[in-house]
Image (cartoon, helix red, strand yellow):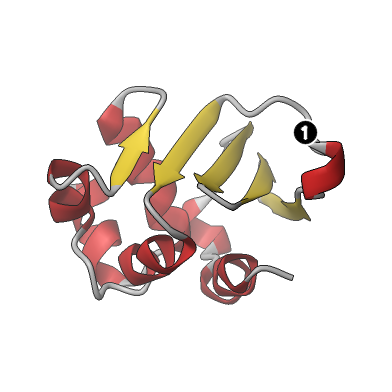
Amino acid sequence: MHRLLKVLKQQCAAERVGDLDLQIAFVWPDGECNVCIHPRQVYFIQADQSKRPMAPRAELILYFSSEGCAIDVLQGRYNPIDAFMNEDFKSNGYIMWAFQCLAIFSSTSAANIASA
């Protein structure tokens, strides 16, 4: 199991999910994991590199320069805005939506950014 998947599971704040219904892909150069969010339910899927894509198509894709970068952002050691400005974090969609979705799995730094 990817280290990132473990962090996502540990830090998932179900009370922040609300009525969201989407799939998020967390992608870095040598890995990927997916999170399926349904109203008040969250499912975690690790993509099998030999059979990608394993999960249904993600509506939101969060790209990170490395798995360690993603973990640092989620655990508050790397500010997500700084990561975005340094091109260590990108999204396929509206960046504020990305920050809001990221906050479901984040420590206080990303959660504070999403609520600002």
Question: Which element is circle 1 on?
Answer: loop
Q: Residue at the spot x=45%, y=40% of the render?
A: 62
Name the quadrant of the N terminus.
Answer: bottom right
Q: Is residue 18 visible?
A: no
82 lies left or right of 32: left
Number of numbered discs present? 1
Percent position (x, y) of residue 97? 35, 32
Q: Is residue 50 above or below residue 71?
A: above
Q: Quadrant of residue 22?
A: top right
Q: Residue at the spot x=21%, y=44% of the render?
A: 84
Q: Which residue is mark 1?
A: 53
Percent position (x, y) of residue 35? 66, 48
Q: Residue at the spot x=27%, y=72% of the render?
A: 76
Q: Is residue 6 above or below residue 58?
A: below
Percent position (x, y) of residue 78? 22, 67
Task: Give the amino acid at mark 1.
Answer: Pro
